[in-house]
Image: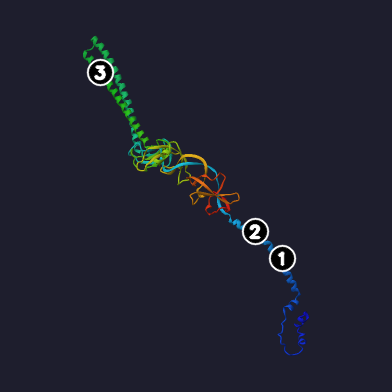
Amino acid sequence: MTESAFRGSHDPKAAPEATGSDAPSTSPAIAPGWWSWFTSKPGLWIGLGVGLAAGLLVGGMRLASEPAAVVDDASEATESAAQPVTVLTVQSADVERSLDTTGTVVPYDLLPIAPRTSGLQIQQVLVDDGDAVAAGQVLAVLDDAVLRSQLLEAQASLESARANVRQQQATLAQTQATLAEAETNLQRFQNLRDEGVISQQDYDSRATAAITSQEGVQVAIANVSSAEAQVASQAARIQQLETQLNQTLVLAPADGIVAERMARLGDVSATGTPLFSLIQNGQLELEVTLPETQLSQVQVGMPVRVTSDADARIDLQGRLREIASLVNPQTREATLTIELPSSSLLRSGMFLRAALILDSRSGVTIPTAAVLPQPDGSSAVYVVQADDTVTAQTITVGDVLSGESPKVEVLQGLNPGDRIVVAGASYLNEGDRVAAMPNE
């Protein structure tokens, strides 16, 4: 069919001529078709061409960009495959072989401090547990009111005794003067008697007066001595009271630290009841026990590392001072005494750990968390390579070292400078890539 016939068959004006009669046609009438619709709209052809060209251009660009997208996805997959782990650089360290034990802190020399006088009420308590004190420092004060009253009375009696001494000395001087006069008169009357001027009776009277004066002098001397003795007695009484007054002060006998305060206000003192206990010079020691099977490995003077589970600040260097000569027959253990350095962190009664250092050498240690036990009984670690992949490395381990962070000695398989995985090792396989983080 030609285009004119296709177009004419759709022209309403040409339709009657084509049929040539009014009889109905045997073929169905053709409605206006797609071709005439497109041919009637030339602008649409242009739009379709532009759209097709744009589609080809966008499709080409998309195809060109797909390889880069594939590369990026592969890179992201590689990045996500790197597992974050904690990495530690192996270093040389001093490795100590030790015997570990535990014990209790005790005073090197514990002094009980009791009052020096009895029957007095405690008036003041000036120190408490843990206070550092110096020799001669006042720790407590006892009631001294009665003693002070007695002291004042004794001092008054002393003054009275001294006045009596002066009085007796004056009496002595008077009797001595009377004696001198009596002796002079007696000599004069003796001459008069010899000359016959006076009678024997007069002379005897003067002789009796002289003898009486002599006896008066002796009595006066005795009275003076008695008065002086009374003065001495009162002075001794005063000294005694002053001593008792000094004893109302409870003093520290030496430098040290108050271990325990038993004194309470209002209690009555007794010479046999301690009011305080004092750690002389603040010196403490650690008493530990060790099985008899290990005694041959230790000796007096060896260093000891002392630590505490309760206080991480306690990390001290002590010295083995004494090994008990007797072994407990029930426990088969001997008591060891460790000398401790002075420290404000230590308290009597503390529970501490002691590591008796047997020897020390240079070696390699790593955290126990990095060690992976193997089914055959060996041990391994993951070593991080330069490309951040890991390689399993078999190691030979030695002693496990105690401390805040448990470590194990590596006898073979690692060198200083190697980088090993600590946290996250159990999730790795040979050749895995890791994202290394520093070990804190």
| x, y percent for residue 26 | 71, 87
Give the amino acid type for the residue marked by disc 2 in the picture: Val
| 372, 265: nearer the viewer | 372
Report the mark closest to the observer, 2 or 3: 2
Callout 3: 10 Å neighbours few (<14), some, many (20+)?
A: some
Label 1 sits on residue: 57
Circle 1 sits in a helix, a strand or a loop, which is it?
A: helix
Left or right: 100, with 187 as reference point: right
Quadrant of res 284: top left
Q: In which quarter of the image is the N terminus?
A: bottom right
> In the rendered image of this protein, does residue 213 appear above or below residue 366?
above
Q: Residue 292 carries which label?
A: none
Is the residue under label 1 in contact with that under label 3 (CB below 8 Å)? no
Chain-order first, disc 2 or disc 3: 2
Give the amino acid type for the residue marked by disc 3 in the picture: Ile
Circle 2 sits in a helix, a strand or a loop, which is it?
A: helix
Callout 1: 10 Å neighbours few (<14), some, many (20+)?
A: few
> In the rendered image of this protein, does residue 286 appear above or below residue 422?
above
Give the amino acid type for the residue marked by disc 1 in the picture: Leu
Quadrant of res 182: top left
Is the residue under label 3 in contact with that under label 2 (CB below 8 Å)? no
Left or right: 149, with 300 as reference point: left
Give the CA distance from mark 1 to mark 2. Answer: 23 Å
Callout 2: 10 Å neighbours few (<14), some, many (20+)?
A: few
| x, y percent for residue 160 | 33, 30
Look at 23% across and 14% down and name the residue there.
203
Q: How is the image coloured?
A: rainbow
Give the CA distance from mark 2 to mark 3. Answer: 149 Å
- In the displayed image of the protein, which residue is found farthest to the top? 195
Work out whether residue 109 can be spotted.
no
Label 3 sits on residue: 211
Q: Residue 71 carries which label?
A: 2
